[in-house]
Amino acid sequence: MGMRPAVLAVDAGNSKTDVALVAADGTVLGTGRSGGFQPPLSGVEAAVDVLGQAVAEAVAAAAAGLAPPAPGAPYADRVAACLANADLPVEEHRLAEAIAGRGWAPATEVRNDTFAILRAGLTEPAPGGPRGVAVVCGAGINCVGMLPDGRTARFPALGQISGDWGGGGGLAQEALWWAARAEDGRGGPTKLAAALPGHFGLGSMYELIEALHLGTLAQRRLHELVPVLFAVAAAGDPVAAALVERQAEEVVALAVVALGRLDLLGEEAPVLLGGGVLAAGYPLLNGRIEELLARRAPHARVSVVTAPPVLGAALLGLDALGAAPEAYGKLRAHFG
């Protein structure tokens, strides 16, 4: 084909990294995948090495269709990277410098990974550029918004110290807290006390607590408790239902504040829901979010984003390059 990559799109989460090399006309030339991106644990350079593994795989996959580059030449015109753990602008800047140092492209832009969900869920070509708000509820919770003039709304999203509540990790911890207190008598009854240990084939909360404390059950498996919590809530358990209600309220609070900061409360605007917890489509949660938003932001148009986030990163790259309208359709068609 002899095509030249225009965008090196990167979506890096805590558990995996996806990369796509995309031509200016929206053709996906190659993709790659590597492990999680965790600079707070591994350090910035080691974390960028993980990105490099996915980049190398994408370049290798695209090699048959690419015009041979000059030795040391960049892989694309622009890196568009949406990264977990880029929660503050200063972190985005530091990571952009580290990625730019690899020479993958002459221009590098880094954003928090929530922007990938937002952009993937927005249709195009939008007049003037992307416009809307996204709330992501995956392992944690975050919200961003953007306007065509470049203004954004965002939150630190650093957990409890920045006022956050919920996400899959937070919901699992809350469910454990209530279940433990129900079993030992410090709290009221809840069916979570039997359902949570039962999921792992254990007979009591004491056994589950012991297994988690001693490491015979890996902490990373706690995310498995989120569907259990929703099932118990759907069956009418008041404690579990209260946790789902609080999660809905947190999602709506983030969305409404972001809409307000961007002066979008008085006009029709998309509110996009993404991340594992929201994309799972639990009626008790998503339905309640729609009810609460209808009261507090009646012009909001709510939808769930299930497209891969690397699509959003690639779209942001095409936006920055001023791609033709048909390029967006070709890119979206590739990712289904």
Image: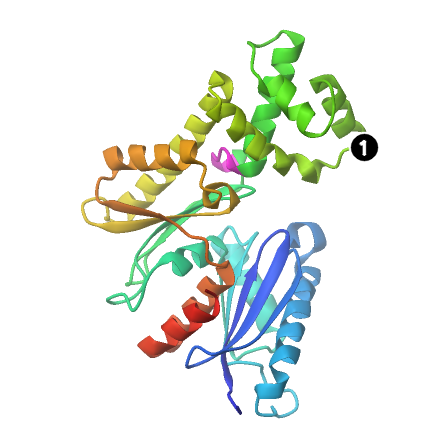
Q: Is residue 259 left or right of residue 157?
A: left
Q: Residue at x 52, y 45 (%)?
A: 276
Examine the image and state in which quarter residue 265 appears.
top left
Determine if the magenta segment contains residue 284: no
Residue at 41 percent of width and 81 percent of height: 25
Where is residue 251? Give x, y as percent. 40, 37
Going by the numbered disc 1, the residue's amino acid type is: Thr
Taking the view exactly as shown, the residue that stands out farthest to the top is 185
Question: Vertically, is 334 above or below 83?
Answer: below
State whether residue 250 appears in this view.
Answer: no
Q: Disc 1 marks which residue?
A: 216
Mark 1 crowd level (few <14, some 14–19, many ≥20, 10 Å Cα): few
Is 271 above or below relative to 159? below
Q: Residue 112: where, in percent of width, then height?
A: 49, 55
Q: Residue at x 32, y 57 (%)?
A: 151
Residue 252 figure quarter: top left
